[in-house]
């Protein structure tokens, strides 16, 4: 065990469960509007809800989530005297005005008396991960603790980026998983039921100390670990070092990484977001390294950022250049693009710097000057999934913009995408014509008409669109011939080529021409899961 805190967290979890301090119970207790205020960093709304409530859950919310000064006697009443004392012995709590030290190390030499007020030195947050109650241990959240300025080695808890990456990472069973840059252990936590073993790495020892607390709480939680309906939890190892150095020469079935991807000047202000590499160098490094550390068929799931410049669509070519010419398939999904001014302002506020302050103005000007020097017109953000294929096969890179709303979890979609593209890689045009397909359940057909300006009355048809109503919600514009053809497909019915021939005969189209142009359009629908190959369904 790296620190005494790792020994304490299972006892804390037992007390949390006993007093309903779980993500679901807290949400039920506070209500949706108050929970939203908590996530916005507005503790006053939560305090108003708690008022003078002395229920154990209210005390735990006030202490652990709001970091409000709490009498030792109150904590002892909720947690028990021994466990409350252990909070101070491991440095998890200390008297008001104290400063957090090393993880697991006592802050106050003397144990506070019953009437003294104490506050947490770290953040302890109940979360729901992969449908299970978990608890994440991290450094204090500056959005809740007034006046708190995160240190350079600040260890982030469950941030928006962590949640985004979890939403795209599958939870299917695999052998070895690498969590590169684990931080407080959030991604490893999401893979505990999926992996046989997890290797979690970080440059900062402090991060590994807190990740250990997070993971020990889960691995030794009697409710979670003894449920016979759930798969066994993974064996976990924690390794300290820079980037891929701790796992040199090793390969994994799955890699997850939420690296310090902020596109900046190369300076390090906070290790959880600043890499020390110029512009999008951190994302490039992780992409290149992941390709070297995947087993055959293994998939890497990376959250990253990249530069947009004056070249139209140049960003997609940049990402493609990070990948080898042979041996991988990659799917890049850009979720958002920020202009330089918005980007700089957002990240300065993230580190508790007022953009109006002298420091904020100086940092803004220097950052934007660096962007202007490098002709940066925007900063993209999104997901990069990479699958290792045969070294003799040409790489296949698909870059897409996915800016519309999608489901909160699309991890299974990522695996399905590689299943479909692998199938397509093995098919010739003739093979596709000889294949049978299923229209994906839940598809919606949109027939859009607009006011007929020429006639001055009524409507005229403008576009036919077929759209998935779940997952990534892909949408494709189609025409009447393609609609008729895909409407005639069935996994136990006629092959695609025969359906094309029948339609061509009935509608007066040239069969040969229709056979020539249709497969390429079918390929796009298969890639996005609109059409499902019958052979994959049967298999």
Image (tube, rainbow, N blue to C red):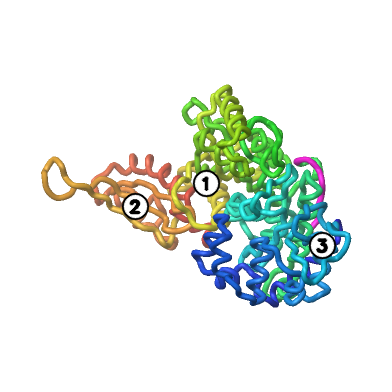
Left/right placement of residue 7 relative to residue 31 reads: right
- The residue singled out by tag 2 in the image is 485
Residue 307: percent from the left, percent from the top? 56, 32
Residue 56: percent from the left, percent from the top? 67, 75
- The residue singled out by tag 1 in the image is 424
Secondary structure of residue under mark 2: helix
Examine the structure image and report whether residue 329 is included in the region drawn in magenta.
no
At 66% from the left and 44% from the top, the residue drawn is: 388
Secondary structure of residue under mark 3: helix
Q: Residues within 10 Å of mark 2 (few under 14, many from 20)?
A: some
- Which region of the structure is painted magenta? 236-243
Q: Nearer the viewer, residue 112 or 93?
A: 112
At 44% from the left and 48% from the top, the residue drawn is: 404
Residue 483: percent from the left, percent from the top? 32, 52
User: Of callouts 3 and 1, which one flags the residue occurring earlier in the amino acid sequence?
Assistant: 3
What distance separates the C-alpha of mark 3 from that of mark 1?
48 Å
Q: Quadrant of the C terminus?
A: bottom right
């Amino acid at each position: 065990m790296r620190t005494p805190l790792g020994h304490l967290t299972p006892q804390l979890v037992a007390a949390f469960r006993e007093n309903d301090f779980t993500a679901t119970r807290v949400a039920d207790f506070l209500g949706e509007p108050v929970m939203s205020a908590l996530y916005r960093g507005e503790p006053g709304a939560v305090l108003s809800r708690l008022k003078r409530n002395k229920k154990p859950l209210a005390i735990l919310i006030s202490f652990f989530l709001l970091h409000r000064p709490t009498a030792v006697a109150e904590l002892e009443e909720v947690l028990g005297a021994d466990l409350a004392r252990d909070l101070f012995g491991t440095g998890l709590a200390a008297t008001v005005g104290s400063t957090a030290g090393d993880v697991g190390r006592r802050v106050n030499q003397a144990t506070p008396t019953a009437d003294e007020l104490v506050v947490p030195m770290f953040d302890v947050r109940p979360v729901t991960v992969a449908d299970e109650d978990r608890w994440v241990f991290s450094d204090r959240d500056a959005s809740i603790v007034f006046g708190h300025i995160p240190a350079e080695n600040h260890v982030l808890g469950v941030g928006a980026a962590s949640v985004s990456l979890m939403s795209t990472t599958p939870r299917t069973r695999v052998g070895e998983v690498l969590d590169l840059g684990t931080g407080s252990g959030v991604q490893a936590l999401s893979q505990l039921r999926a992996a046989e073993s997890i290797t979690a790495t970080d440059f900062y020892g402090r991060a590994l100390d807190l990740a250990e607390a997070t993971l020990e709480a889960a691995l030794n939680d009697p409710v979670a670990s003894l449920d016979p309906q759930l798969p066994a939890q993974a064996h976990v190892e924690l390794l300290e070092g820079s980037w891929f150095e701790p796992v040199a020469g090793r390969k994994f079935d799955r890699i997850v990484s939420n690296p310090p991807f902020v596109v900046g000047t190369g300076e390090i202000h906070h290790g959880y977001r600043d890499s020390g590499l110029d512009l999008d160098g951190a994302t490039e490094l992780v992409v290149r390294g992941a390709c070297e550390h995947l087993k055959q068929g293994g998939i890497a799931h990376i959250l990253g950022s990249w530069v947009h410049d004056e070249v139209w669509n140049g960003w997609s070519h940049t990402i493609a250049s990070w990948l080898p010419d042979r041996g991988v398939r990659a799917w890049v999904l850009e979720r958002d693009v920020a202009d330089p001014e918005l980007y700089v302002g957002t990240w300065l506020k993230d580190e508790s710097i007022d953009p109006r302050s002298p420091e904020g103005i100086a940092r803004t000007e220097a950052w934007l000057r660096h962007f202007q020097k490098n002709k940066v017109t925007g900063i993209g953000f999104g997901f990069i999934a990479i699958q290792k294929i045969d070294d003799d096969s040409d790489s296949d890179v698909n870059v897409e913009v996915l800016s519309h709303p999608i489901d909160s979890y699309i991890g299974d979609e990522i695996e399905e995408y590689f299943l479909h593209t692998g199938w397509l890689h093995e098919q010739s045009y003739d093979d596709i014509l000889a294949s049978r397909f299923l229209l994906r359940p839940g598809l919606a057909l949109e027939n859009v008409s607009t006011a007929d300006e020429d006639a001055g009355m009524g409507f005229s048809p403008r576009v036919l669109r077929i759209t998935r109503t779940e997952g990534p919600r892909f949408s494709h514009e189609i025409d009447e011939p393609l609609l008729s053809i895909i409407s005639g497909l069935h996994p136990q019915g006629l092959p695609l080529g025969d359906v094309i021939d029948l339609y061509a005969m009935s509608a007066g189209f040239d069969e040969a021409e229709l056979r020539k142009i249709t497969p390429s359009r079918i390929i796009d629908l298969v890639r996005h899961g609109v059409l499902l190959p019958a052979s994959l369904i049967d298999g």
